[in-house]
Image (tube, rainbow, N blue to C red):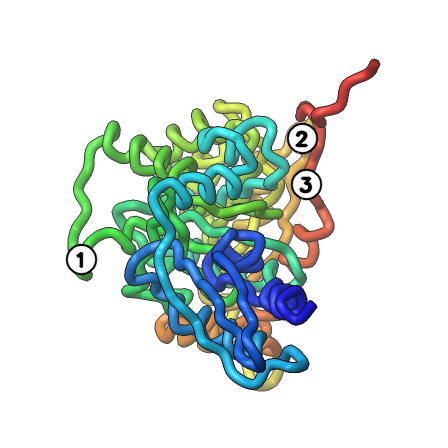
């Protein structure tokens, strides 16, 4: 009975990378109790597991909380290749890795795009992901801006590396969001200069080899413009929804429209426009329109059709706190939630969270006898 009680306590220990109980992941090889001492066989997924110290500490705390246990001896080992393969198969639910975000996936995929650089798309994507996670959703961010990757820095995990378990890559987690970026695979300050086929393979591997688990929402931070990556995303994820980011000035608005039109050509649906840098709130409450007004409404009007109306979902004001948070790796939605930009982004997250995951056109795995 004491051994069963220890196992029950260990079922509350969560692997910080896989986000599941270690007992469910078959990381507990066995439990033996002699007198008041619990002997626990702990099997880590890989040699040099970055979460090893955290897992062992939590195992000791859980075991010592069991009535009748006075001391704990943890024998730390590593899974065999066969055990890792079995774990990989279990995590994927027996499904091929190509189905992670395939047509049958229930994960809602939202691509954040813009016509030109410098409109704050990456900062907005990072903060939106953190705000969505704060609502209780399971969120991932795929940094598809291979040449200008910046998501790890904005989220404060520059230098973080994914963990590889067999052929499965586990993305780092920042503020409750699972994140993958080419910046995690290249040396700092390295310039990435790849042609189309290499870009296509990279995005494809991010969508298949990286194991995100069961996400509610996957955000894609796309590079500006209508180049190879936008076309690849359209081919691989035609079910994705698109958010178009623009600034109020007319020059940016005209270019932003083009990125949405390319997405529509691949079957993706434009769900709204976000107007960033909409104005700077002054101490007296007035707004200084540094970049003019009306760009967001103009893009939404031009993209709207009778069958598919497009609205401005949010107007994000210029914010010093938003900029500072992006530079320091502290998302403003957490660091300064009362900042006007943080309030607007959180409201957008709440609006998107209410959308839920669609079932239209997806098989439900049911059969009629």
Q: Please indicate, yes or no, whether residue 230 appears anywhere in the rendered image.
A: yes
Closer to us: 327 or 139:
139
Which circle's residue, 2 or 1, is located before the other in the chain? 1
Say whether residue 78 is left or right of residue 290.
Answer: left
Q: Is residue 26 above or below residue 55?
A: above
Say whether residue 104 is left or right of residue 186.
Answer: right
- Give the label, 2 or 1, closer to the camera: 1
List x then y, in percent, for residue 50. 35, 65
Say whether residue 268 is left or right of residue 222.
Answer: right
- Residue 357 — which label? 3
Q: Secondary structure at mark 3?
A: loop
- Give the label, 3 or 2, closer to the camera: 3
Q: Few, some or many C-alpha atoms within 10 Å of disc 1 (few <14, some 14-19, many ≥20)?
A: few
| Residue pictured at 64% horizontal, 51% vertical | 313
**How many marks overall?**
3
| Residue pictured at 54% horizontal, 64% vertical | 31
Which circle's residue, 3 or 2, is located before the other in the chain? 2
Q: Please indicate, yes or no, whether residue 277 appears anywhere in the rendered image.
A: no
Circle 1 residue: 187
Circle 2 residue: 308
How far is mark 3 from mark 1, CA to CA? Answer: 37 Å
Are the two marked residues, 3 and 1, in contact with CB atoms closer than 8 angstroms?
Answer: no
Closer to us: 5 or 213:
5
């Amino acid at each position: 009975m004491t051994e069963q009680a220890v196992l029950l306590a260990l079922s509350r220990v969560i692997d910080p990378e896989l986000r599941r109980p270690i007992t469910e992941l078959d990381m507990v090889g066995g439990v033996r109790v002699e007198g008041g001492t619990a002997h626990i066989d702990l099997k880590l997924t890989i040699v040099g597991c970055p979460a090893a110290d955290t897992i062992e500490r939590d195992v000791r705390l859980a075991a010592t909380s069991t009535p009748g246990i006075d001391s704990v001896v943890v024998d730390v080992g590593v899974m065999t290749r066969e055990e890792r393969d079995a774990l990989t198969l279990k995590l994927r639910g027996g499904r091929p890795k190509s189905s992670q975000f395939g047509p049958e996936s229930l994960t809602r995929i939202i691509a954040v795009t813009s016509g030109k650089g410098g409109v704050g798309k990456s900062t907005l994507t990072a903060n939106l992901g953190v705000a969505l996670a704060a609502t209780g959703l399971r969120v991932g961010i795929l940094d598809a801006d291979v040449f200008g990757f910046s998501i790890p820095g904005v989220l404060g995990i520059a230098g973080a590396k994914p963990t590889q378990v067999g052929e499965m890559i586990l993305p780092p987690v920042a503020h409750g969001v699972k994140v993958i970026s080419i910046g995690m695979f290249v040396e700092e300050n390295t310039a990435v200069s790849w042609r189309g086929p290499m870009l296509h393979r990279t995005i494809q591997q991010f969508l298949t080899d990286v194991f995100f688990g069961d996400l509610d929402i996957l955000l894609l931070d796309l590079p500006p413009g209508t180049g190879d990556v936008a076309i690849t995303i359209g081919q691989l994820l035609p079910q994705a929804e698109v958010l178009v980011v623009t600034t109020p000035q007319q020059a940016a608005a005209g270019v932003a429209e083009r990125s949405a039109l390319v997405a529509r050509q691949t079957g993706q649906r434009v769900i709204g426009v976000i107007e960033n840098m909409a104005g700077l709130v002054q101490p007296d409450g007035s707004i200084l329109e540094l970049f003019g007004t009306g760009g967001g409404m103009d893009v939404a009007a031009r993209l709207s059709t009778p069958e598919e109306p497009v609205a401005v979902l949010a107007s994000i004001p210029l914010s010093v706190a938003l900029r500072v948070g992006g530079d320091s790796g502290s998302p403003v939605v957490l660091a300064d939630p009362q900042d006007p930009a943080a309030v607007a982004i959180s409201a957008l997250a709440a609006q998107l969270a209410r959308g839920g995951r669609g079932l239209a056109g997806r098989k439900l795995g049911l059969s009629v006898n």
